[in-house]
Amino acid sequence: MRPENQSGVSHFLLRGLPIRPDHQGVVFALFLGVYLTTLLGNLLLILLIRLDARLHTPMYFFLSHLALSDVSLSSVTVPKMLVNMQTQDQSIPYEGCISQLYFFIVFGSLDNLLLAVMAYDRYVAICHPLHYTTIMREGLCVLLVAGSWIVSCVHALLLTLLLVRLSFCADNVINHFFCDLTVLLELSCSDVSLNKLVIFTEGGMLFLLPLGSVLGSYILIGTVILRVPSTKRLFKAFSTCGSHLFVVSLYYGTLASVYFFSSSWDSKDIIASVMYTVVTPMLNPFIYSLRNRDIKQALEMFVNRANFVK
């Protein structure tokens, strides 16, 4: 049975961003620039980590997968939004909407899990520096990343399969710029109690456990630093954890404002969604690189090598 026969609709209409028609051109150029910057910044970061042997450490291994996840997360939503703005065609096929939802959940969950893994890596580096190479061995790093990918894919598959069993009736207008699960559940004319129960339990655990891991790691790091406070140790801890802590705050802050602290879906939630789906993936390469001497040196060597080849 084809999905549209079961759902009652063959396509959805994405209302898009809450902007005036005469501002469409400026907003299109802005988001195109942001998306291209996201692609260039994250792919360059992945390339530098792969090419420079000094960056073959657990921290940069995790960072390369976070960059890949960020590129993918933006690519799931932004290109379709740009096409809709350019063509003035807001429709998206039912199958395309479901596919977009699945991959959005995959990479959104993957970001969440990788941030927790990176927090644990920083905890080991600061609290157990003498045993760092023993604890964060290659096998464990691969296992943590592979586990994050598997959990994210299974989580997305579960929520997607629960969604496709629902029916959608006359109202097919999505008040968003992509197919978000919360909005789709509001449009369904079926009983969504099971979907909400799974989101609250399984989805809540997948959000709260990594967040708890991040908070726990930084509480332990703070405890260790404050036992013997010194300016040198504080500066080292900040240079090691500051970038990650800023990204965590930005990611979880916008995510929570959309899905936990909002009673109704409005333009403020859409703007917050733009922050964690579009802006944060663009900022991550800059946040992790600006105060990172290793990344700067790797970039200088890459530029010099490119100039030498010319």
Image (cartoon, grey):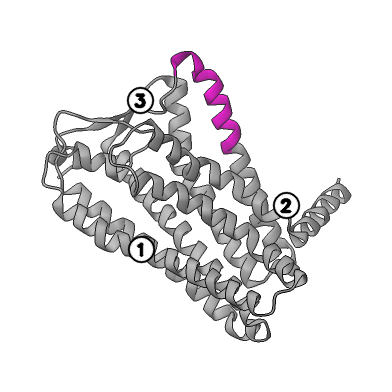
Which quarter of the rendering shows the N terminus?
A: top left
Can the viewer see residue 293 in this picture? Answer: yes
Residue at disc 3, secondary structure: loop
- Residue positioned 45% across, 23% down in the render: 85
In the rendered view, tell whether residue 80 sits above or below residue 205. above
Q: On the image, numbered disc 3 is attached to which residue?
A: 90
Disc with the residue nearer the chain's start (2 vs 1): 1
* Mark drawn on residue 139: none
Disc with the residue nearer the chain's start (1 vs 3): 3
Q: On the image, numbered disc 1 is attached to which residue?
A: 206
Q: On the image, numbered disc 2 is attached to which residue?
A: 290
The part of the image, by quadrant, that contains residue 166 is: top left
Q: Are marks 3 and 2 in contact (CB under 8 Å)?
A: no
Q: Which residues are magenta?
A: 20-35
Disc with the residue nearer the chain's start (3 vs 2): 3
The part of the image, by quadrant, that contains residue 92 is: top left
Gap between marks 2 and 1 measured at Cα: 31 Å
Q: Is residue 30 left or right of residue 160?
A: right
Q: Position of residue 182 (x, y in %)?
A: 28, 44
The part of the image, by quadrant, that contains residue 107 is: bottom left
